Image (cartoon, grey):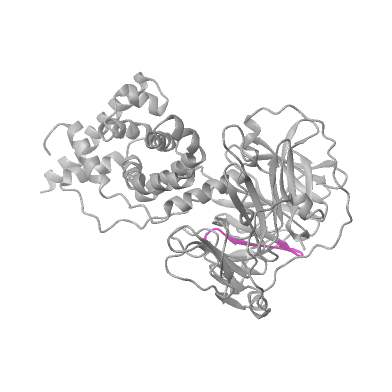
Amino acid sequence: MNGNLEDRIRSTLGHAATRAPRAPGGLATVVVSRSRRRRLRAQALTSAVAVAVVAIGVGVVIRGPGPVTVEPASPSEAVASPATEPKPWTPATETVEQVWPDAVWRMPRKLAGDVEARPRVFLDDRTLLLETWESHEKVDAIYAYDLVDGTSRKIASISTPKGVFASGFTPGSGRIIWMTYESGNMRLWSVPVEGGAPSEIHTDPPIRGISDHLAIVGDRIVFSMADGGVYTLPLDGGTATALPNGAGLHLLRWPWAGTPGHRTPNGEIAFQRLTNVETGESALAAANPGEIMVRCGITMCSGIRPGGSTGFARLRDGTQDRDLPGPSYGGLAADRFMTVRRSRSSGQDLYDLRTGRSADLGIRSDAKGESVAVEPGMGDGRLLSYPLGDEYVIIDLARIP
Amino acid sequence: MDDDSRFADFVAERADALLRYGYVLSGNPHDAADLTQEALIRLHRAWSRVRRKQDPERYTRVIMARLHVNAWRFRRRERLAWDPPEQTHHADFPSDGEQGLWRALAGLPPKQRAVLVLRYYEELTDIEIAGVLGISRGTVRSHASHGLNRLRTTIADPADSRRGAR
């Protein structure tokens, strides 16, 4: 080998660079979508702008605990249902509170004691699970917040080692479960919804990897792994067993699981194939060449048409195809809701594809021209929450008729 | 043109160059993809500010270098979306010497490697490197010196043994 070492390093690095992977098509779209998703998660991004502590007594309209409709229809039911004319979007003239008064609440962003708390999931028709953070995304406690009377109570303090994060809080059967990821293994934890000290749900053998979806069904936990595969485990612990119909699949909403899951590294259609892991019924979503960012729910798919500018939505079987008023990066929530960004300054509408109604979320850009981007499809299909001033707006999508 | 289309244009124009940089920084295609995507996500979140005040590509490269030295990939929580195929069909290095040096670079601690990449691939001065990595100029020189020594030792040994075997 000739030349001095420094020249040889230059030459080696230069040649090595030619072996680098090439950027995939649509990388910008993926990045923008991930960026928005992360922004949504870190909903309290404006907390850097120190907000003076504001009196807590927020007037919440009290309303009856009407029945909550849960929508998991099956793909076949949706296909069999009479075709409905796609309802076009028109810019909203009213706020979400005016359009859907029974589904919208407001709550302070800070609990008594000046602790910033983030809404995560509904515990029941009027109670939210909130989490507080010790540092970025590191949960140190969970609370129950009563939307009707505005009171909160601590459910549990959570302590995790450095670098270990509690996530995936899931209520069911009187408990709340969550997971941590340590040394390559997933650990599951549980606390009664009334409160108490967290206890570990022991698994023997340990579960390698991390879950991408947890649910409680009766006295069992069902979960899918980030690498695929649906498993079940007694709520009191024991051995996780693979479900025969769930091999390689990712849970979308019990009992529906599909492949690929939310993670689509090569531009695949999220949840293109969907299987009912209890019955084995399955459905495959229609696909057209050139479409990108296609994400499917149980009955509907949405994405961006070839060319990259027009959003679309349609049923899994390809029927009832219509243009969307904007791109839906995160898919549709509950197979029917998306946000439409009118322009940077004039905010976002929540748009219901099923009824054609839309309502102003009330978000406006701040002095720096920044605003929160709300992506309903990245949530759990029921809770939509976002910060607005000193409050969170809470929308229960299941209460929208 | 709105911010998102400007951002998309930037990614379309510069993503391949950033991947090359990520590849020489990290030494493998997966980490190159991870570094690039993570840095672009962070760039997008700061896009309007960065575009107003500084060069987006420079900003992204600084993020990538810092992510690399902070061994971010070992503790990231979010799985990254994009898994590039293993590159097996690409041309090999023109000489065994370069192949050996590339392998030797893989044995360096991240900070030493980053300093050498910034010096000899990015052609930055030690003061600029100090700025990128957020360390002192003395530390830059120390990392460079240790890295170069280690490379000399590593590439000397296998070459000698291979010659001896012939």
| Viewer-proximal residue among A130 and A357 | A357
- How far across and down, in percent of the image, does residue A121 sit? 72, 52
The quadrant in which the N terminus of chain B is found is top left
For residue A248, side relative to residue A101 (left or right): left
| Viewer-proximal residue among A179 and B91 | B91
Magenta residues: mostly which secondary structure?
strand
For residue B138, side relative to residue A148 (left or right): left
Answer whether residue A338 is magenta in the image. no
- How far across and down, in percent of the image, does residue A321 sit? 56, 71
Residue name at image x 34 percent, y 39 percent = B25
- How far across and down, in percent of the image, does residue A282 sit? 59, 77
Extent of the magenta region: A216-228
For residue B3, side relative to residue A142 (left or right): left
- How far across and down, in percent of the image, does residue A200 sit? 70, 50
Q: Quadrant of residue A215?
A: bottom right
Residue A333 visible in the current orientation: yes
Look at the picture and state if B8 lies above or below A113.
Answer: below
| Viewer-proximal residue among B57 and A368 | A368
Residue A191 visible in the current orientation: no
Answer whether residue A224 is magenta in the image. yes
Residue name at image x 38 percent, y 55 percent = A24
Look at the picture and state if A390 lies above or below B35.
Answer: above
Look at the picture and state if A285 lies above or below A324.
Answer: below
